[in-house]
């Protein structure tokens, strides 16, 4: 009996020593500062990776020196299965405990994608392809199906994605980014529509989106948006054709070579606002929030025409009569000829 008690005591003492050593190893592992060569580094946890593989990779990269301590900690606490996949930014000054906390809450590194005001669908998707953090799954031809899948009432995707900067973890699918942009555009349209000037001759938010896309393509100047919107609104009220070049160019599509001709203006397409009255059937680009506000709160006045000044500042000269407009066009053409001659003389 005495021998058994001594043996039991020895086993218990050994167990206590082992537990104490394990506890020391765990605490030392958690409080160990990470070894980061530069100020920060990126560490990727692939989906489905085991914690053993994660800790071994961290040790192999020299970030931690006691992977076994972290494995014991993960095993004892049962958190190994809660580690979230993703791309993490590890910084100098962090401890292994800080790192583990980030892994558990999924504090992953975010990337961004900006939709530029005035982009069309083709330009937007090309930029998405060039963003290595986005996982591409669709093309322009797939967008109609995508709209149907998200319950959109629209069949044509042009103009439906709000120009903003969107943030997401690496590997996010393109459809997830597009869904964010679509939802934000719908929320913006509905919000601005409820605040609209009731005198604006637009029947629904989609018509506002169409006109906003035209304003967006006509000027990049914030101070001119509402004034140009006012010109188009007055033309719609007076049943004048909008006669705006960006819609004609959109109707030409990929065949447009950068030179808009008189023949182009006379060639009928659903988007040619020289040959057809009213709005084109869809937006021609992605309008920003300010362009949407401009068409729903157009600047009052009597202007019915505008043309570029050619001064290099993106500005336009506005006119109330066709005679004033024709004089402004002649002034623009004369300035362009003078600029070409000055360029040749250099």
Image (cartoon, grey):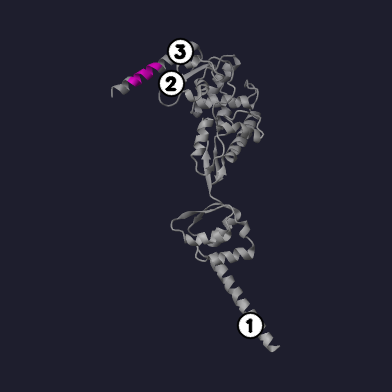
The crowd level at tag 1 (other Cα within 10 Å; few <14, some 14-19, many 20+) is few
For the point 63% across and 82% down, which residue is it?
Answer: 10
Q: Which mark is residue 96?
A: none
Numbered disc 2: secondary structure:
loop
The secondary structure that most of the magenta stretch takes on is helix
The quadrant of the image that shows the N terminus is bottom right
Numbered disc 3: secondary structure:
helix
Q: Does residue 196 belong to the magenta stretch?
A: no
**Mark 3 or mark 2, which is nearer the start of the sequence?**
2
Q: Which residue is mark 2?
A: 259
Name the spot of residue 255 as percent of width and height, x first: 47, 23
> Which circle, 2 or 3, is nearer the viewer?
2
Question: Are the residues tagged 2 and 3 within 8 Å (C-beta)?
Answer: no
Number of numbered callouts drawn: 3
Q: Which residue is mark 3?
A: 326
For the point 55% across and 28% down, which residue is it?
Answer: 291
Name the spot of residue 208 as percent of width and height, x first: 60, 25
């Amino acid at each position: 009996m005495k021998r058994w008690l001594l043996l039991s005591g020895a086993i218990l003492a050994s167990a206590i020593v082992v537990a104490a050593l394990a506890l020391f190893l765990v605490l030392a592992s958690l409080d160990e500062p990470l070894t980061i060569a530069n100020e920060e580094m990126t560490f990727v946890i692939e989906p489905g990776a085991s914690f053993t593989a994660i800790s071994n990779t961290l040790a192999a990269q020299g970030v931690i020196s006691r992977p076994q301590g972290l494995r014991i900690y993960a095993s004892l606490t049962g958190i190994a299965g809660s580690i979230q996949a993703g791309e993490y930014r590890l910084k100098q000054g962090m401890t292994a405990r800080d790192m583990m906390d980030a892994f558990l809450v999924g504090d992953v590194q975010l990337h961004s994608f900006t939709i530029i005001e005035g982009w069309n669908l083709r330009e937007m998707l090309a930029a998405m392809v060039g963003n290595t953090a986005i996982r591409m799954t669709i093309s322009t031809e797939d967008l109609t199906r995508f709209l149907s899948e998200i319950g959109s009432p629209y069949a044509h995707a042009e103009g439906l994605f709000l120009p903003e900067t969107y943030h997401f973890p690496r590997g996010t699918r393109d459809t997830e980014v597009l869904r964010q942009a679509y939802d934000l555009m719908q929320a913006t349209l509905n919000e601005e529509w409820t605040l609209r000037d009731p005198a604006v001759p637009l029947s629904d938010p989609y018509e506002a989106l169409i006109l906003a896309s035209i304003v967006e393509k006509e000027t990049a100047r914030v101070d001119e948006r509402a004034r140009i919107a006012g010109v188009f609104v007055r033309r719609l009220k007076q049943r004048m054709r909008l006669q705006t070049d960006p819609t004609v160019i959109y109707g030409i599509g990929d065949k447009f070579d950068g030179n808009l001709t008189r023949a182009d203006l006379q060639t009928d397409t659903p988007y040619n606002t020289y040959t057809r009255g009213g709005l084109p059937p869809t937006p021609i680009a992605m309008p920003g929030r300010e362009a949407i506000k401009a068409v729903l709160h157009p600047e009052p006045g009597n202007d019915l025409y505008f043309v570029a000044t050619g001064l290099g500042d993106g500005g336009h000269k506005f006119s109330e009569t066709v005679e004033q407009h024709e004089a402004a066009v002649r002034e623009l053409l004369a300035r362009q000829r003078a600029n070409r001659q000055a360029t040749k003389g250099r």
